[in-house]
Structures are given as C-alpha cells and as structure tokens.
Image (cartoon, rainbow, N blue to C red):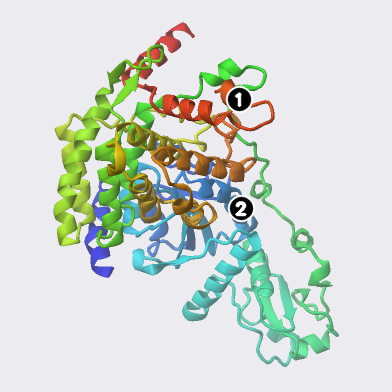
C-alpha cells in the first residue's frame, strides 16, 4: 500500500506545483467542470486540486487547523443524501473553526481525479481527518461518516482530544481538568491578563459535553477563558454545585460567579449572549438556489413529458467511459483477482453487446449505425484483447490501464463525448441524474441488445450478462451505499438466480430490479422533481402497457422495453436538434 502511495504522490505534487496555490475558505468557489454539492452559503470549505495542498498541508501557517474532509462525487446518490447532514454538521461546529475546519472535494470532477486517487478513495462519501500541521497524506486517516450531527460532533471531539493530549497546542482549548488550587486567584493561572472572564465547566465524569462546550466557546477565546473541573474538586464544593454538568462564569477579581447554571437547563446561546455574539455574519441568512426550469405535470401534459424520455447514445458512452476510466482506477491500486476478473467480464460484455445500431422510429426494422458507438465498440474489443494477457498474469497496474484506454481512444478518434452535456440524463439541476442515469441506461440497453443479438438456442446464458453487470457494480461502483443495496438486492431480496430462467429474463430481471430501486427511492431527497421515480414504463410513456387496475400488460410492456432501448438517439442528431431548438428560442 505505502509503496504505491509513494509513487503516486510526487505526481500529484508535480501537478499541483504547476497550478497557482490557493488557500480555500468557505467562501471560495472551487475550480470545477462538474457541479459541486456545496456552495458559498454553507460552512464547508470547498477544495480542488489547486487549493487542496496549500489549504490542508498548512504546517507553515500560524493559523493552521485540523481538517475534516469529505471526498465525494457529485453524481453519487448517497453523497447527495448525506449533503444536508454534512452542511448541518458544518454549521453546528462553525465556532470550532480556529481548531478544525470542515471541508469537501468533488472527486467526481476530472480535475480532482489524480488527487483523490493519491488518497486511495475507495468509495463515496469517504471522510478523512487531517491532523493540525499535516504535511502529507500520511498525516490523515479515514473516519466513519455518521448520519447524525451528534455522531459527527462526538467523532471529531474524540480525535481533537487525542491530538491535543499528545501535542499540547497552546492556542487550542486545554482539556485537562483543573488541578489543586488554594486560592481563587490560582483559578486564573495561565489566563492572559487581557481576558476578564473565565468559565468553568463542572462534570461528574469525563465525557464529550465539556470539551464540546469548550470548543463552542473557543471562538470567543480573546474574551473568555474556559476550564474543566471534576465533581470532587474543592471548587465544586465551595460553590455548592450538586447538579452536573454545570457551568460557572467568573469575572476577574471577583470570588463569586456572575453566572451559574446546570447545563441540561441551558442552551449554549444563553452562554453566548452573556458575552455577546459580536459577529452577526456567523449566522447569515441563506437562500436555497433552485432551478428556474418549469416542472412538467406528466398527468396534465403526458405528450410533453414523453419527449423528455429517450435513450441517448451520448449519455451511455459518457457514462461507460467514466465507469472504465475513472471508477476502475479510483484508488490507484493495482488490479488482480476478483476486481481484475470483474473488469474483464464487463469489458467482454461491452465488446459483445454494446448497442451500435438504432432503429428508425417509424420503421422498426430499419436499423441505422451509431457512428460513435461503433468506434467505442472497437475500443472495447481491443481492451478485451489487452485484458486477456493481464488475466493470465493476474496483475494490471492502474496507470497501465489508464494509458491503454487513452491510447485506444486516440486510435479510434475519441468516440466518447466526455465534454458533451448530458442529454436525456440532464437533471433539473446539477445535483440530479447525470452519470448514474447514464450508467443504468447503458445497463438496460446492454441487456436488450444481448437478448436481440445473442446466439439462439442453448448457446446463450442470460446469467452471464447479468453477472458481468453485478460484478462491475460490486467491485467498482463508487457509491458504497448504492453498491451495497444493489448487491443485497441481487443476492438476497430479489435474488438473481431465482428470477432468471429464460432468455428474455436477461432484460426483464434488470427492469424489475430497477423498479424495486425506484420504489425505494420514491420521495427521497435525491429524486429529481422533474424526473420522478415512476414505475417504468409510466402511463404517459406507454398507455397500452398500463391496465386500468394499476397492473401492467406483460406482452405490451415487454415489447415497449425492447423498442425503447433499441430506439437510441444518435449523438450528432441530438446536437443538431439542440442547436435547432436554440435557434428557434
């Protein structure tokens, strides 16, 4: 593991060395080609390849802090779902900013790929704690992504306590308990003479509450000092404190606290109000950025809705290229064993069955060649031949795979439209659809193509196709939560082996499985309001498929699925159509 990291990190250093180094803050707009999940109204420091090193590796800066960094992908459904909780958590610990800052970087953006790979990001979201004065990746470690604010607060509190116990930073809170004192004046030992207030937190036993309140109040470190005291200390007895935890606030020169309260009856805002929140910008009013696109009611206007649903050659190629080029090499580790086998099987599937023709929508028997897909299929075939040798050796370096994909792309005139906008998979805003939509579309089109083009008789095993898709998802799909759900569904709740018996099950199984997923995600905050999680095909797409009793007509539905994933919009015709629409607008 370390040997690989050592070889990769210098490349990242060289890369960032040619870029203008920036120190990012929560108001920084990151360099990006893909939309991010956060914006400047959040308390999250947005990083990119040009700002990461100078921001995180801050040992030379006097105001260096620890960092908690979320490595995410903008297309990842669970990252989208986690975003609101991470934002809430960042806002909750905003007063801790002189000790630790909350940050994020979009690994789904190509410009950040090499950096994320150097950090061995195996899945999303992936959260790392970087110690204060970090100098390189070895000063960080992975932590659990808790889905509650309290869980995340406790997580970083634990790491901050451990780091402070070891390092004894003078400008961080001193989490040690007050020692033996003989006079009240000794209580002020170590407190700057310019500070006139002192808060003492009394606790019955060590836990995270006192340290977290100390961190909450650290924003006001130039106005008030904070110390920690055990229940058996003479100070607790002298103040007749019987309820724990409690807080007492002293003013310099006075023996009697000017403020005292049992903490369970107290909100931190009351403590804060005592010495004044002098920085109103810390709690700004924020406005949610919403899409200005009109959401179409598919019941009222089914024909308009229907036009938004089609299979795009461009979307499939764009998604598959990302799957092969970025997902496979995400963590930079060599491929061998199961993951190398999974890659070979998936590329073999692409070589055999990636659709290279479309049907004329008016004459279903008239097939038209898809130019870009045909070139891509040649790339897949060459990649398959390349992988055969690697399978024999049971070893493939991630860099070698990247170089081979690059070489073949160039050889076949760059068939993957990596810079094109999403077509059918273009969401109502940047946080929706995109890659995952394109990937699912490609999976469905592959199964339909296999059904149509595979050898007849007993020479075709539908399980081979489905196992190849499942193998790729289980080994490479970056969204860990999504991956686990898919594997659990195909292995347990809707077991593949129990539902695939006949040739047509190759496409029917994945269709039914996708509807199970859509049902689970219906109403989820990852659902695009412009593309709701309908049971496919929705009535506006195929009225003949949907019976009046709410069930589907099997014959009509099966025919529709085959036709839908066979009528693929060619990439160039999409571009011409879009240009034509733009001219008329």
Residue situated furthest front in the rendering: 457
The mark that comes first in sequence, 2 or 1, is: 2
Circle 1 SS class: loop
Determine if residue 350 is in view: yes
> Which of these two is toward me, 429 or 184?
429
Depth check, mark 2 against mark 1: the one in front is 1
Determine if residue 26 is in view: no
> Which of these two is toward me, 49 or 443?
443
User: How far apart are labels 2 and 1 at the CA level?
Assistant: 35 Å
> Which of these two is toward me, 316 or 278?
316
Q: In this view, does 238 lie above or below 338?
A: below
Q: Residue 85 carries which label?
A: 2
Rendering coords of residue 341 (x, y %): 27, 56
Q: In this view, does 299 lie above or below 462?
A: above
Q: Which residue is drawn at 15% across and 59% down?
A: 392
Residue situated furthest top in the rendering: 584
Q: Which residue is drawn at 48% across and 25% down?
A: 560
Q: Is residue 278 above or below residue 545?
A: below
| Residue beneath disc 1 | 539
Quadrant in the rendering for residue 373 = top left
Q: Residue 507 carries which label?
A: none
> Which of these two is toward me, 434 or 496?
496
Rendering coords of residue 140 (x, y %): 41, 66
């Amino acid at each position: 593991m370390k040997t690989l990291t050592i070889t990769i990190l210098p490349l990242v250093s060289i890369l960032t060395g040619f870029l203008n180094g920036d120190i990012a803050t929560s108001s920084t707009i990151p360099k990006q080609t893909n939309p991010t999940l956060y914006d400047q109204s959040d308390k999250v420091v947005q990083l990119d390849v040009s700002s990461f090193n100078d921001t995180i590796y801050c040992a030379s800066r006097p105001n260096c802090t620890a960092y908690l960094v979320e490595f995410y992908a903008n297309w990842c459904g669970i990252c989208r779902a986690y975003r609101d909780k991470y934002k809430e958590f960042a806002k909750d610990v905003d007063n801790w900013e002189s000790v630790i800052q909350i940050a994020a970087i979009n690994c789904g953006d190509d410009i950040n790929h090499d950096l994320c790979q150097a950090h061995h990001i195996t899945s999303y979201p992936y959260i790392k704690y970087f110690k204060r004065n970090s100098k390189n990746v070895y000063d960080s470690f992975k932590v659990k992504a808790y889905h509650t604010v309290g869980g995340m607060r406790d997580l970083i509190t634990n790491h901050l306590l451990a780091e402070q116990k070891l390092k004894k930073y003078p400008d961080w809170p001193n989490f040690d308990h007050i020692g033996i004192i003989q006079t009240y004046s000794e209580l002020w030992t170590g407190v700057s003479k310019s500070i006139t207030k002192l808060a003492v937190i009394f606790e019955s036993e060590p836990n995270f509450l006192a340290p977290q309140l100390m961190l909450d109040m650290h924003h006001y470190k130039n106005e008030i000092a904070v110390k920690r005291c055990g229940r058996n200390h003479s100070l607790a007895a002298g103040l007749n404190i019987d309820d724990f935890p409690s807080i007492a606030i002293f003013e310099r020169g006075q023996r009697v606290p000017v403020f005292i309260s049992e903490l369970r009856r107290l909100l931190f805002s009351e403590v804060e109000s005592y010495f004044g929140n002098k920085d109103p910008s810390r709690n700004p009013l924020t406005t949610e950025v919403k899409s200005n696109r009109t959401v179409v009611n598919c019941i009222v206007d089914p024909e308009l809705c229907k036009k938004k649903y089609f299979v795009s050659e461009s979307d499939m190629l764009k998604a598959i290229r990302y799957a092969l080029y970025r997902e496979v090499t995400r963590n930079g580790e060599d491929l061998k064993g199961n993951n190398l086998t999974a890659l070979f099987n998936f590329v073999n599937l692409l070589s055999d069955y990636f659709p290279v023709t479309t049907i004329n929508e008016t004459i279903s028997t008239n097939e038209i060649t898809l130019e870009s897909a045909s070139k891509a299929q040649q790339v897949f075939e060459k990649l398959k031949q390349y992988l055969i040798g690697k399978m024999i050796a049971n070893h493939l370096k991630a860099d070698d795979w990247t170089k081979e994909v690059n070489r073949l792309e160039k050889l076949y005139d760059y068939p993957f439209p990596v810079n094109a906008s999403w077509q059918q998979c273009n969401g109502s805003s940047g946080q929706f659809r995109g890659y995952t939509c394109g990937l699912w579309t490609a999976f469905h089109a592959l199964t339909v193509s296999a059904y149509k083009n595979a050898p007849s008789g007993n020479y075709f095993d539908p399980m081979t196709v489905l196992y190849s898709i499942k193998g790729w998802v289980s080994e490479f799909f970056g969204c860990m939560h999504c991956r686990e759900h898919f594997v659990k569904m195909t292995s347990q709740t809707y077991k593949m082996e129990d539902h695939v018996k006949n040739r047509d099950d190759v496409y029917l199984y994945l269709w039914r499985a996708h509807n199970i997923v859509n049902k689970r995600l219906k109403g989820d905050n990852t659902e695009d309001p412009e593309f709701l999680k309908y049971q496919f095909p929705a009535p506006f797409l195929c009225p003949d498929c949907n019976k009046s009793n709410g069930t589907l007509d099997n014959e009509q539905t099966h025919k529709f699925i085959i036709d839908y994933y066979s009528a693929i919009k060619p990439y160039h015709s999409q571009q011409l159509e879009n240009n034509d629409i733009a001219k008329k607008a």
